[in-house]
Amino acid sequence: MDKTIAGATIQVNEEGYLTEFAQWNKEIGTELAQEASIAMTPRHWEVINYLQQEFKNESPLSIRKIGKSGVVVIKEFYQLFPKAPLKTATKI
């Protein structure tokens, strides 16, 4: 289904995830974060960049894997994305 955000129409599935990664940009990510009540900081973007790289590499993601990545420890991950961190961060 279509969703208009940051002045662009994007395709999302029923859960709100982008279905076409090429449609993503930082402005869309920022607005998606705002919808989740998250004010993005450089630290948030470091985590998002890591998640995107893992997605591009087709690597499965889990909280445990992210915690062992060296990018962010699990406690901080929950602080950055308090409500369902993996789900929220991957949506952004």
Image: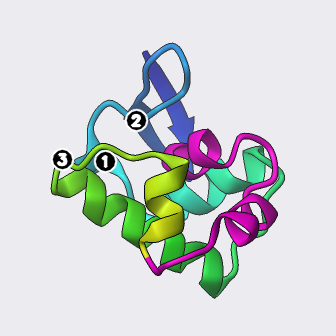
Tell me if label 1 and label 2 are in contact, CB under 8 Å: yes
The residue sitting at 16% across, 56% down in the picture is: 57
Of pointers 1 and 2, the one earlier in the residue sequence: 2
Disc 1 residue crowd, few under 14, some 14–19, many 20+, Cα 10 Å: few
- The residue identified by callout 2 is 18
Residue 34 locus on image (x, y percent): 75, 54
The residue sitting at 62% across, 62% down in the picture is: 30
Q: Which residues are magenta?
A: 70-92
- From the image, state whether disc 3 or disc 1 is nearer to you: 3
- The residue identified by callout 3 is 58
Q: Is residue 41 magenta?
A: no
Q: Main SS of the magenta segment?
A: helix
Q: Residue 72's image quarter?
A: bottom right
Q: Residue 20's image quarter?
A: top left
Which mark, by number, is residue 23? 1
Task: Establish if 16 lies above or below 83.
Answer: above
Disc 2 residue crowd, few under 14, some 14–19, many 20+, Cα 10 Å: many
Observer-nearest of 30 and 88: 88
- From the image, state whether disc 1 or disc 2 is nearer to you: 2
Secondary element type, mark 1 = helix
Amino acid beneath label 2: Leu
